[in-house]
Amino acid sequence: MRPVIAALLLSATGLTLTGCRAHPPPVSPTAAGLNVRDLVDPAAQAEAEDLNPPDQLAILGERLRVERKAGSADRPPRHVLCLSGGGAFGAFSAGVLVGWTGRGDRPTFDVVTGVSTGALIAPFAFLGPEYDPTITDLYTTIRTRDLYRLRLLTALLGESFADNRRMAARVDAAISPAVTAAIAAAHRAGRRLYVGTTEQEGKQFVVWDVGAIAAGDAAGGRELIVQILLGSAAPPGFFPAAEIGVTVDGVRRVERHTDGGVSQSIFFRPPYVPPEARSDPAARDLAGTRVYAVVAGKLYADPEAIRPRAISQASKNVAATVYAQTRRNLQQVYADCVVAGMDYHLAAIPPGYPAPRSSLEFRPAVMVPLFEEGRRVGGSAAAWRTLPPGAGPGEGPLARAGTALTHRPRGPAQPVLGPDRLIRPPASDRGGIPAVPREAAVK
């Protein structure tokens, strides 16, 4: 009897294995090389876009902005530059500035704001094109070992996974007494430089007037600026927080400041108005001001197959939150422009560019191509889009009333990263083009 049962079990097992080979389980769209953005429920999508056209709000906003801007033509334009966070992707932002200089129409900025990697670029963008070699060197020659050292064995009991003392030494050298004096002189001339950090315990976004600190009489101004920049560029848990001494009603305290991008990815501040002119509505009028937002990254993440591992899924969800926050912050800047009649200009890494997977990978092989892409964008007459995220082709939400979908490209082509770690153009555009290894794409 036992041999018969064993034979039956073997037979059943063979049938099961044969069935599995004949009918493999379906894979995710991304694993198949498809961009989920382009998988459409035609009827539901058409109805949603008829009821709420994705560009309708932008059209109304532009109409209001143009009306609000009318009458500002006889006033010299003011220029505000907003630099986002993005780690090593700051190489793109640096390239945009250098390319803009090469084009010949880069203005002197009345205001520069920066967060995280944008905070490190901001002082040199503020001081002008003569500092282009500084940011070029910073973002094309540095390697991971020049900035930090991992300390995984002590990370669980310590405050961070990495020791950033090497980065601190570089920032200290870059913000020299001469650079600090130049920032102070520009501040006294009425220009403004702001950097954002996150106060770790209160989880509050803090905007530092770096020019006022540079121009102030208090001792240690340069050292404080260095600490602010290090704090703004310190992802919590990865780099240690910057400890900044403060005095509260005469009592000395210590605050801990980390990555400003935790609270806001990018922010706007208006040009300076002297106290004696602030009661004059015309002096405070922002109409005609030109606002430039440079994003060290893409507006929308490249599709990527996620491995069924808790850590992988958690990290990807955090990344999705950061992308969404960046878009919301850019939309807020656009809303400010609409209400005040300011011109809105936005530059980000193009959708089709094969961006690296990690913003903490500092290698010339990765950062030089990012820098050159930024220089190409910054040097182009079509460098800037004038509408916020969500108003471009394929940027609206997907609408579905069921699960029967069709592949219909809704926007610019994006690389798709499957589980085999290869970049694939979307299926509609790929044709006979072979998949490109990511390492080859960024060299």
Image: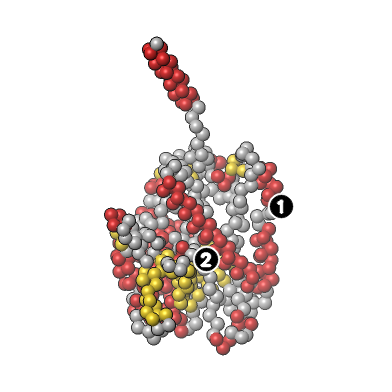
Classify residue 285 as left or right of residue 196.
Answer: right
Classify residue 77 as left or right of residue 245.
Answer: right
Total marks placed? 2
Label 2 to label 1: alpha-carbon separation: 31 Å
Pointer 2 residue: 293
Residue 72 badge = none
Q: Nearer the viewer, mark 2 or mark 1?
A: 1
Front-most of residues 275 and 242: 242
Q: Residue 385 appears at what percent x and percent y?
A: 57, 61
Residue drawn at x 43%, y 62% is 90
Front-most of residues 92 and 168: 168
Question: Where, by quadrant of the figure, is residue 177 drawn?
Answer: bottom left
Q: Secondary structure at mark 1?
A: helix
Front-most of residues 204 and 248: 248
Q: Residue 331 appears at what percent x and percent y?
A: 58, 63
> Can residue 430 be seen here?
no
Residue drawn at x 50%, y 65% is 264
Relative to 40, is 127 above or below?
below
Q: Earlier in the sequence, mark 2 or mark 1?
A: 1
Residue with the most extreme bottom position: 276
Question: Where, by quadrant of the figure, is residue 6 drawn?
Answer: top left
Pointer 1 residue: 51
> Can residue 315 be seen here?
yes
Instruction: Give the crowd class for mark 2: few <14, some 14-19, many >=20 residues within 10 Å.
Output: many
Give, as a three-letter code, the residue at label 1. Leu
Quarter in which the N terminus is drawn: top left
Relative to 437, is 54 above or below?
below
Residue drawn at x 36%, y 54% is 365
Give, as a three-letter code, the residue at label 2. Ala
Q: Residue 286 appears at what percent x and percent y?
A: 60, 76
